[in-house]
């Protein structure tokens, strides 16, 4: 009735994703096409604190723009001051993901979004109560109608809107992207040529190390435009597991200690690192892969130097690798006004 009175219509405008030319196409679910109205609604909901029990936190509280939409704390704090046990993953290029959460328990972005609101360690609000709050707001009632043509919206509509917004959060304008294009004989624009010419010898050396079997040997799990392979891996953090990771979901002992391989995009901004945030700096991560690998029954066989504790990089090589990792920072992504709160 309210929508009729305020003359709100349902005529959604298709949303055109800005996908970098060197990226693959994104598969959009047939039951959740991208629209301008849906993306706007998702952006509103991402920063909506009324989705938490005491109205103090939102999705954006644990996924901050300047941290590549991750949490700078080891563990995020829920509404009751409770702490989780895993580090909040960076929200970047989610439209190409095939699993979600560190253990891969969600298969779609829409499915993943439904979990944090009722989770007692996070936002701790039942969906029926969250929806009741949103329905008291005329702005939200109108926007849900504009986006989905519904008056009686529910949690599935919230998930779809948030998923649409998150799919727009594409990072593909770092110095690494120019290096990737150049290395793969993809034509560069004049501005990209200038960036290519600014790449230092140390950064190129780090790139070579990154890809080398006898160097840092990173490319088995991190490569291509996404800087990520869609798999679960035990990367030698522990000999004995306090968190079984993927094994909890599959109940397969062969998956114990395995976690989703994260993207390395904007890695310099998304500390701390690993599923439990145990490493505070990139230097700590490089040290782990150099000398700190712990052997266990499910260690990833592609970690070829596990038997000697790691790839044994010297100080010069570590500096080169770090210099390359810094090229993965996409400042246009983290400062994009389209990803910020509408009313900061």
Image (spheres, rainbow, N blue to C red):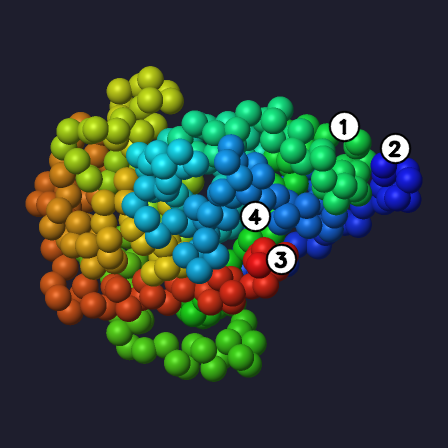
Callout 2–callout 4 Cβ contact below 8 Å? no
Taking depth in this image into account, of 50 and 322 the one nearest to the observer is: 50
Q: Nearer the viewer, mark 3 or mark 1?
A: 3
Q: Which residue is labeled 4 in the image? A: 47
Q: Marks 2 and 4, how far apart in space?
A: 27 Å
CB under 8 Å between callouts 3 and 1?
no
Q: Which residue is mark 2?
A: 1
Q: Earlier in the sequence, mark 2 or mark 4?
A: 2
Which numbered disc, 3 or 2, marks the residue that appears first in the sequence?
Answer: 2
| Place of residue 185 in the rendered image (x, y in percent of width and height, measured from the top left) | 48, 68
Q: CA distance from mark 3 to mark 2?
A: 28 Å
Which residue is painted at 28% across and 59% down in the image? 210
- Which residue corresponds to mark 3? 343
Q: Earlier in the sequence, mark 1 or mark 4?
A: 4
Is mark 1 in CB contact (under 8 Å) with mark 2? no
Q: In terms of secondary structure, where does tag 4 sit? A: loop
**Residue that numbered label 1 is attached to:** 152
Marks 3 and 1, the one that precedes in the sequence: 1
> In the image, 233: left or right of 44?
left
- Tell whether label 2 touches label 3 (CB within 8 Å): no
Which-is-in-front pick, marks 1 and 2?
A: 2
């Amino acid at each position: 009735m309210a929508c009729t009175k305020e003359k709100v219509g349902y005529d959604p405008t298709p949303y055109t994703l800005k996908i970098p030319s060197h990226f693959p196409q994104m598969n959009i679910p047939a039951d959740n096409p991208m629209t301008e109205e849906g993306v706007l609604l998702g952006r509103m909901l991402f920063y909506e604190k009324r989705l938490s029990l005491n109205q103090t936190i939102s999705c954006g509280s644990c996924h901050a723009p300047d941290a590549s939409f991750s949490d700078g704390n080891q563990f995020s704090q829920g509404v009751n001051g409770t702490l989780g046990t895993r580090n909040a993953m960076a929200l970047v290029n989610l439209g190409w993901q095939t699993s979600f959460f560190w253990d891969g328990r969600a298969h779609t972005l829409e499915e993943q979004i439904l979990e944090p609101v009722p989770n007692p360690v996070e936002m701790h609000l039942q969906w029926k109560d969250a929806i009741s709050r949103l329905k008291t707001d005329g702005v939200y009632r109108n926007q849900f109608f504009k986006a989905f043509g519904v008056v009686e919206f529910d949690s599935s509509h919230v998930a779809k809107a948030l998923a649409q917004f998150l799919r727009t959060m594409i990072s593909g304008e770092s110095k690494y992207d120019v290096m990737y294009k150049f290395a793969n004989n993809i034509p560069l624009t004049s501005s990209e040529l200038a960036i290519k010419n600014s790449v230092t010898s140390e950064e190129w050396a780090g790139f070579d190390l990154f890809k080398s079997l006898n160097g840092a040997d990173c490319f088995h799990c991190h490569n291509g435009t996404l800087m990520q392979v869609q798999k679960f891996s035990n990367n030698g953090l522990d000999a004995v597991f306090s968190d079984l990771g993927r094994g909890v979901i599959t109940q397969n002992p062969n998956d114990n200690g395995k976690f989703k391989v994260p993207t390395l995009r904007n890695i310099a901004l998304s500390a701390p690192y690993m599923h439990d945030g145990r490493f505070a700096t990139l230097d700590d991560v490089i040290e782990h892969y150099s000398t700190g690998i712990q052997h266990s029954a499910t260690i990833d066989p592609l970690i070829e130097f596990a038997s000697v504790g790691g790839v044994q990089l010297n100080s010069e090589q570590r500096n080169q690798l770090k210099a390359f990792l810094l090229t993965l920072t996409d400042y246009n992504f983290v400062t994009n006004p389209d990803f910020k709160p509408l009313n900061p």
